[in-house]
Amino acid sequence: MANPAIRSDSAPPSALWKAADALRLLARYLGVSIRGQMQYRASFVMSALGQFFITGIEFLGVWALFDRFGHIEGWTLAEVSLFYGVVNVSFSFADALSMGFDKFSVSVKSGEFDRMLLRPRTTALQLSGQEFALRRAGRLAQGLIILVLASQYLEVEWSAARLFLLVATILAGAALFYGLFVLQAVIAFFTIETLELMNTLTYGGVQTAQYPITIYGQGFRRFFTFVIPLAAVTYYPMLAILERSDPLGAPLWLCWLSPLAGPLFLTGAFGAWSFGVRHYTSTGS
């Protein structure tokens, strides 16, 4: 007689268990990548310092602009520096974690993606853990320094609510930029090569979001608010933190809820990724 404690029709794992298992595997992927990069510590340190100084030179351009004109439509250097710090911290996380999607066209051309499809894990998980660009720590450090200095100069009173909004804004910005890298990879399903146009939305988006959305034209504002919601994960939350009224008339409650646009955008990007996987045709490499 069969043991009644053993069931051949055991219940499938729950969605929560699957998510936790995927996160554990992703952490192992990233751990392997980090340990591999730390085998060459001098190379890591030089790469990180290079990132730090390159982004520092970019900030010198922002400083020179305000040194010449004083302010831009009422926005001071310290206020824009707060934007700069938040955006660069957000982007550094997304850029470090999205290397698999950023280089996805290479996987398509080489046939590596065909092998990913045969493995018992989702392709999105495999690409997310393919490489962790630890050298992006340089951009992260530079963004954090500017963020701290700007908040001290502006004498922002960091209440628990404002700190929560700041963290939510950084995470939402990281989610949005990560979603842009995913969409860039989706294009490679149909064109093999990723389009350089996407760089205007990823790296160019960083430059755009470093300034308040009000300084741009109406069409530009609408695009980066309703299509690529950069304003939702930078401009509106910063208004709430700085306690400034919106010249465009947005209510205060919207400024507090706007970071939700980041994870919603990422969800849509992964939906597009699923569509691309279903319509993928091997290159035959």
Image (cartoon, rainbow, N blue to C red):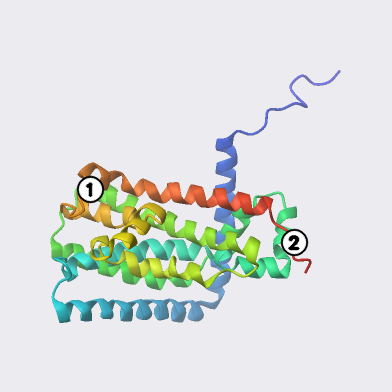
Could you give the CA–CA distance between mark 1 and mark 2, rounded to whole angstroms? Answer: 47 Å
Q: Residue furthest right?
A: 1
Question: Residue 262 placed where, x, y %?
Answer: 40, 51
Q: Quadrant of the N terminus?
A: top right
**Residue 161 position (above or below residue 117):** above
Q: Say whether residue 53 is left or right of residue 33.
A: left
Disc 2 designates what residue? 282
Label 2 secondary element: loop
The answer to whether the residue labelled 1 contacts the one labelled 2, judged by CB atoms less than 8 Å apart, is: no
Characterize the local packing of mark 1: few (<14), some (14-19) or many (20 or more) Cα atoms within 10 angstroms.
Answer: few
Q: Which label is found at residue 250?
A: 1
Q: Amino acid at mark 2?
A: Ser
Can residue 129 be seen by looking at this rendering? no
> In the rendered structure, which disc, 1 or 2, sits on the residue that comes first in sequence?
1
Name the residue rendered at 32%, 81% in the picture.
57
Question: Residue 253 placed where, x, y %?
Answer: 24, 42
Between marks 1 and 2 in the image, the one whose residue lies nearer the viewer:
1
Q: Amino acid at mark 1?
A: Ala
**Residue 273 position (above or below residue 144):** above
Name the residue rendered at 25%, 62% in the picture.
212
Q: Which label is found at residue 83?
A: none
Can residue 271 be seen by looking at this rendering? yes
Question: Residue 137 placed where, x, y %?
Answer: 41, 69
Question: Residue 177 placed where, x, y %?
Answer: 44, 60
Camera-nearest residue between 89 and 196: 196
Name the residue rendered at 55%, 72% in the picture.
37
Characterize the local packing of mark 2: few (<14), some (14-19) or many (20 or more) Cα atoms within 10 angstroms.
Answer: some
Q: Quadrant of the C terminus?
A: bottom right
